Amino acid sequence: MLEADHDEIEGLHSEIDKALALRKPELVLEKVDLFWARLAMHIRAEHLRLFPALLRKNELKFEKLIELLREDHNVLMHELAGVMKTLRGVSNEPAETVREKIMAVAIRLERHNEIEEKRIYPLVDNLFDEDEIKQISAGVKKELENLPPRFNDQLRNTEKIS
Protein backbone atom coordinates (compact mmCIF):
# COMPACT_ATOMS: atom_id res chain seq x y z
CA MET A 1 0.00 0.00 0.00
CA LEU A 2 2.78 2.45 0.87
CA GLU A 3 4.71 1.54 -2.28
CA ALA A 4 1.64 2.30 -4.38
CA ASP A 5 1.37 5.61 -2.55
CA HIS A 6 4.99 6.36 -3.48
CA ASP A 7 3.96 5.94 -7.12
CA GLU A 8 0.96 8.26 -6.72
CA ILE A 9 3.10 10.93 -5.09
CA GLU A 10 5.69 10.57 -7.85
CA GLY A 11 2.87 11.13 -10.36
CA LEU A 12 2.02 14.37 -8.57
CA HIS A 13 5.63 15.47 -8.99
CA SER A 14 5.24 14.92 -12.72
CA GLU A 15 2.17 17.18 -12.65
CA ILE A 16 4.25 19.90 -10.98
CA ASP A 17 6.84 19.66 -13.76
CA LYS A 18 4.13 20.09 -16.37
CA ALA A 19 2.62 23.06 -14.54
CA LEU A 20 6.06 24.68 -14.28
CA ALA A 21 6.60 24.18 -18.03
CA LEU A 22 3.28 25.91 -18.71
CA ARG A 23 4.43 28.87 -16.55
CA LYS A 24 1.10 29.07 -14.74
CA PRO A 25 1.86 30.11 -11.14
CA GLU A 26 -1.66 29.37 -9.84
CA LEU A 27 -1.50 25.85 -11.28
CA VAL A 28 1.99 25.30 -9.87
CA LEU A 29 0.77 26.41 -6.45
CA GLU A 30 -2.21 24.03 -6.66
CA LYS A 31 -0.03 21.06 -7.68
CA VAL A 32 2.72 21.73 -5.12
CA ASP A 33 0.14 22.16 -2.36
CA LEU A 34 -1.42 18.80 -3.21
CA PHE A 35 2.02 17.14 -3.45
CA TRP A 36 2.95 18.59 -0.05
CA ALA A 37 -0.32 17.43 1.54
CA ARG A 38 -0.12 13.92 0.06
CA LEU A 39 3.48 13.54 1.18
CA ALA A 40 2.47 14.69 4.67
CA MET A 41 -0.29 12.05 4.73
CA HIS A 42 2.20 9.37 3.68
CA ILE A 43 4.69 10.47 6.31
CA ARG A 44 1.96 10.53 8.95
CA ALA A 45 1.01 6.95 8.06
CA GLU A 46 4.60 5.83 8.53
CA HIS A 47 5.16 7.83 11.74
CA LEU A 48 1.90 6.82 13.41
CA ARG A 49 1.38 3.28 12.12
CA LEU A 50 4.40 1.59 10.55
CA PHE A 51 7.38 2.91 12.49
CA PRO A 52 5.90 2.38 15.97
CA ALA A 53 4.95 -1.19 15.03
CA LEU A 54 8.52 -1.88 13.93
CA LEU A 55 10.00 -0.24 17.02
CA ARG A 56 7.80 -2.40 19.26
CA LYS A 57 9.81 -5.36 17.97
CA ASN A 58 12.73 -3.94 20.01
CA GLU A 59 15.28 -4.37 17.25
CA LEU A 60 18.03 -1.75 17.64
CA LYS A 61 18.84 -1.92 13.93
CA PHE A 62 15.40 -0.46 13.16
CA GLU A 63 15.89 2.51 15.47
CA LYS A 64 18.82 3.97 13.55
CA LEU A 65 17.24 3.40 10.16
CA ILE A 66 13.91 4.87 11.25
CA GLU A 67 15.74 7.83 12.77
CA LEU A 68 17.39 8.49 9.37
CA LEU A 69 14.07 8.16 7.55
CA ARG A 70 12.42 10.58 9.97
CA GLU A 71 15.21 13.08 9.38
CA ASP A 72 14.56 12.77 5.64
CA HIS A 73 10.88 13.39 6.28
CA ASN A 74 11.71 16.54 8.24
CA VAL A 75 13.98 17.87 5.50
CA LEU A 76 11.47 17.10 2.73
CA MET A 77 8.59 18.81 4.53
CA HIS A 78 10.77 21.81 5.44
CA GLU A 79 11.87 22.24 1.83
CA LEU A 80 8.31 21.99 0.56
CA ALA A 81 7.16 24.52 3.16
CA GLY A 82 9.78 26.90 1.79
CA VAL A 83 8.54 26.31 -1.76
CA MET A 84 4.98 27.03 -0.64
CA LYS A 85 6.09 30.31 0.98
CA THR A 86 7.78 31.32 -2.26
CA LEU A 87 4.74 30.41 -4.34
CA ARG A 88 2.42 32.31 -2.00
CA GLY A 89 4.68 35.35 -2.16
CA VAL A 90 5.57 35.40 1.53
CA SER A 91 9.24 34.69 0.94
CA ASN A 92 11.91 36.90 -0.59
CA GLU A 93 13.26 33.99 -2.59
CA PRO A 94 13.05 34.36 -6.35
CA ALA A 95 10.40 32.20 -8.03
CA GLU A 96 13.12 30.60 -10.19
CA THR A 97 14.29 28.65 -7.15
CA VAL A 98 11.01 26.71 -7.11
CA ARG A 99 12.04 24.39 -9.95
CA GLU A 100 15.45 23.77 -8.34
CA LYS A 101 13.96 23.04 -4.92
CA ILE A 102 11.28 20.76 -6.34
CA MET A 103 14.00 18.84 -8.23
CA ALA A 104 16.09 18.54 -5.05
CA VAL A 105 13.04 17.24 -3.16
CA ALA A 106 12.31 14.73 -5.94
CA ILE A 107 15.89 13.42 -5.93
CA ARG A 108 15.99 13.04 -2.15
CA LEU A 109 12.52 11.49 -2.12
CA GLU A 110 13.52 8.94 -4.76
CA ARG A 111 16.52 7.79 -2.69
CA HIS A 112 14.42 7.82 0.47
CA ASN A 113 11.64 5.73 -1.11
CA GLU A 114 14.16 3.20 -2.36
CA ILE A 115 15.43 2.67 1.20
CA GLU A 116 11.89 2.24 2.50
CA GLU A 117 10.90 -0.15 -0.27
CA LYS A 118 14.01 -2.32 0.02
CA ARG A 119 14.75 -2.21 3.74
CA ILE A 120 11.60 -1.28 5.67
CA TYR A 121 8.48 -2.47 3.88
CA PRO A 122 9.71 -6.08 3.41
CA LEU A 123 10.11 -6.32 7.20
CA VAL A 124 6.35 -6.23 7.65
CA ASP A 125 5.85 -9.66 6.06
CA ASN A 126 8.87 -11.07 7.91
CA LEU A 127 8.17 -9.77 11.41
CA PHE A 128 4.40 -9.69 11.80
CA ASP A 129 1.68 -12.28 11.75
CA GLU A 130 -1.41 -11.97 9.58
CA ASP A 131 -3.51 -10.19 12.24
CA GLU A 132 -0.75 -7.69 12.96
CA ILE A 133 -0.34 -6.98 9.25
CA LYS A 134 -4.10 -6.37 8.92
CA GLN A 135 -4.00 -3.98 11.86
CA ILE A 136 -1.01 -2.05 10.49
CA SER A 137 -2.57 -1.96 7.01
CA ALA A 138 -5.88 -0.65 8.33
CA GLY A 139 -4.09 2.11 10.22
CA VAL A 140 -1.98 3.04 7.20
CA LYS A 141 -5.08 3.08 4.98
CA LYS A 142 -6.88 5.36 7.42
CA GLU A 143 -3.98 7.85 7.39
CA LEU A 144 -3.60 7.76 3.60
CA GLU A 145 -7.30 8.52 3.16
CA ASN A 146 -7.26 11.41 5.64
CA LEU A 147 -6.90 14.18 3.06
CA PRO A 148 -7.14 17.75 4.35
CA PRO A 149 -10.66 19.10 3.65
CA ARG A 150 -9.37 21.91 1.41
CA PHE A 151 -8.69 19.27 -1.26
CA ASN A 152 -12.10 17.60 -1.42
CA ASP A 153 -13.46 19.79 -4.23
CA GLN A 154 -10.06 20.22 -5.86
CA LEU A 155 -9.55 16.47 -6.30
CA ARG A 156 -12.98 16.02 -7.81
CA ASN A 157 -12.33 18.86 -10.29
CA THR A 158 -8.64 18.35 -11.00
CA GLU A 159 -7.56 16.82 -14.25
CA LYS A 160 -4.16 15.63 -15.22
CA ILE A 161 -2.16 18.09 -17.26
CA SER A 162 -1.72 16.88 -20.84
Image: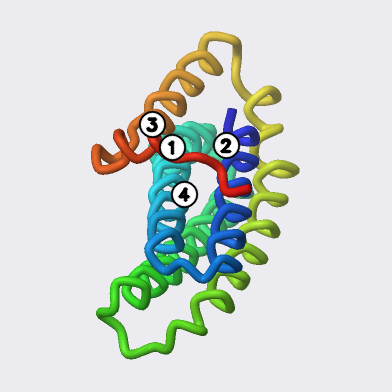
The disc, 2 or 4, on the residue closer to the chain's N-terminal end is: 2
Look at label 1 and name its amino acid: Ala
Question: Which percent across, then down, holds residue 145?
Answer: 39, 28
Question: Which percent across, then down, holds residue 28?
Answer: 45, 63
Residue 19 lies in what quarter of the image? Answer: bottom right
| 130 relative to 87, above or below | above
- Mark number, residue 45: 1
Q: Is residue 94 left or right of residue 88?
A: right
Residue at 47%, 52% (x, y): give it. 35
**Mark 3, secondary structure of its residue:** helix
Residue named by callout 2: 5
Residue named by callout 4: 39
Residue 142 lies in what quarter of the image? Answer: top left
Residue named by callout 3: 156
Instruction: Sort mark 1 into few (<14), some (14-19) or many (20+) by Cα contacts within 10 Å.
Output: many
**Mark 1, secondary structure of its residue:** helix
The disc, 1 or 4, on the residue closer to the chain's N-terminal end is: 4
Residue at 42%, 88% (x, y): give it. 94
Instruction: Sort mark 2 into few (<14), some (14-19) or many (20+) by Cα contacts within 10 Å.
Output: some
